[in-house]
Amino acid sequence: MSIPIRKIEPQFLDLVNYGVCSTLSKLYGVEDTEKVFRLAGETNFRELKKKVRIDSSSPIATLRDIASFLEESGYMNKIELTKVTENEVIIDMYGVSVTESSMRLVEEKLAPSHYMTNMMFAALKDLHQVEADIVHLDFETPEEEIDHVREKWVLRKKI
């Protein structure tokens, strides 16, 4: 008997994201929930390093490898990183699977998981002793109905 292998649909990930984030926020409060998600990002990065080669030659190279993994895994359709300066990068994300739930969580003043962000923050901290500040630049849903989120990350050495 052959059982077909199916991929998880983005709508399912979005549903799970809302359920987990909403529940944790209501049980433990937003601040403690954000701590859980930061720790989860560190755990996820440790596990990812066991399975995927991560380029540690520069912070941008590290971010690009994680971005490729997130694309290949179906977490988002496309992610582009543009190095502006040595310490600044523009990140364009298209078709993020948890956009709808994340926006809803923010509107409800609950903690979104920031899955990608927390994993990338953990990688920067672990491999480069770097932290990032994020400036949200743009969010749009163009005619093709694939959302586009643009952020600028400013990297700085962890003190």
Image: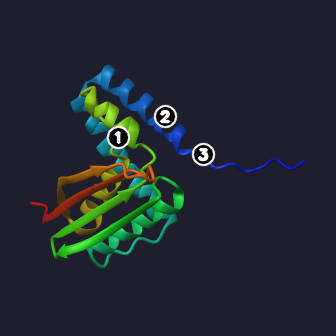
Q: Can you identify the residue that label 2 sits on?
A: 16
x, y percent for residue 57? 30, 79
Disc nearest the viewer among 3 and 1? 3
Disc 2 from disc 3: Cα separation = 11 Å
Q: Which mark is residue 8?
A: 3
Q: Quadrant of residue 34?
A: top left
Crowding near pointer 1: few (<14 within 10 Å), some, many (20+)? many
Q: Amino acid at mark 3?
A: Ile
- In this view, 13 is above or below 109: below
Q: Quadrant of residue 46?
A: bottom left
- SS at mark 1? loop
Which callout, 3 or 1, points at the residue further toward the start of the chain? 3
Q: Can you identify the residue that label 1 sits on?
A: 113
Crowding near pointer 3: few (<14 within 10 Å), some, many (20+)? few
Residue at image location 23% in from the left, 57% down from the top: 151
Residue at image location 26% in from the left, 30% down from the top: 107
User: Seen in the image, is 36 located left or right of residue 74?
Assistant: left
- Kindly check if marks 2 and 3 are in contact, taking CB atoms under 8 A apart as contact: no
Which callout, 2 or 1, points at the residue further toward the start of the chain? 2
Q: Amino acid at mark 1?
A: Ser
Camera-nearest residue between 147 and 32: 147
